[in-house]
Image: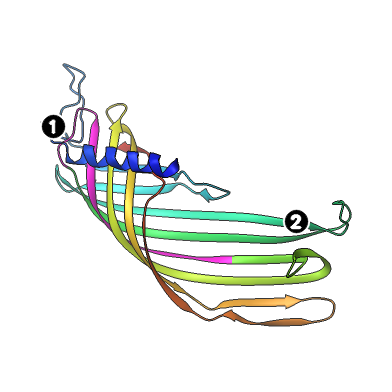
Amino acid sequence: MLQKMTFSAFLVCLTLVFAQPLLAQKPLSSASSGSFASYGAHKSTIEAGLNIAEGNTVVLPKVRYRYFLNDRMALRGTIEAATNTDVERVYQNPNFTGNEGTRTVSDRQWGLQTGFEYHPSGTKRLSPYFGAVVGLNTGRNKEDWKDYNIDSLGGYYEFQTKANITAPFLSFNFGAVAGVDFYLVENLYLGLEMNWGMTVRNNRPTEFSFSSLSSSNSGILEPSSRNVSSNFGALPSIRVGWRF
């Protein structure tokens, strides 16, 4: 169901991008008619958005600035951050009473991205565009155990057993975007954007430390590695922007 909705949204974006109405794509209201007619003197937009995500993922607002070189071409820059945290709880007694142990798995990611956009002709309120982007992302995956241990059957409570596992990474990405802005009023708009991207991710060594009442240990759990992947933006980014 989600894939069908995503594909439909992508087709809408492409249709709007390649449509060729007569009016310029970035609107300016006309005092005489109240309609949207032309660009005017506004050259910048700033916007924030939340990705629609499944599970417990929380995507902090993306902040994007866009500067129009002319009626067709614009430069863009984006700052984004995302975090995801899951907590597994185990108990001293089978009936979920007594002391509690936890295993907290968290992911953190920060990114900077730049690129350009080409804006074909739009309608009175719709501003379609497509372009290319390139960026850097950094972050880490982390596990924290407290009064927790694990075996072949899963996690269980164990007093004074602690562990810390950290896996940092740095990635380079580039890709293509297609989207549309819908102007609610002269300067306020909502946006939808789909994207395709290629990512080269460098994983640094995964380090761990472990301690219990009977032993302790630390070292490298996994060596460094590199992954190359490509993906289509399966979930749209909904944006709210202001031009000035």
Q: Is residue 234 left or right of 124 when viewed as pictured?
A: right
Q: Position of residue 35 (x, y in %)?
A: 20, 21
Q: Position of residue 104 (x, y in %)?
A: 67, 60
Q: Secondary structure at mark 2?
A: strand
Q: Position of residue 146 (x, y in %)?
A: 76, 65
In the displayed structure, 193 sits above or below 115; it is above
Q: Which mark is residue 89?
A: 2
- Which residue is pictured at 53% across the width and 81% down the height? 223
Task: Tell me the quarter of the picture where residue 240 sits.
Answer: top left
Amino acid of disc 2: Arg
Q: Main secondary structure of the magenta part?
A: strand
Q: Which residue is mark 1?
A: 21
Can residue 118 be seen here? The reply is yes
Q: Earlier in the sequence, mark 2 or mark 1?
A: 1
127 in magenta:
yes
Amino acid of disc 1: Pro
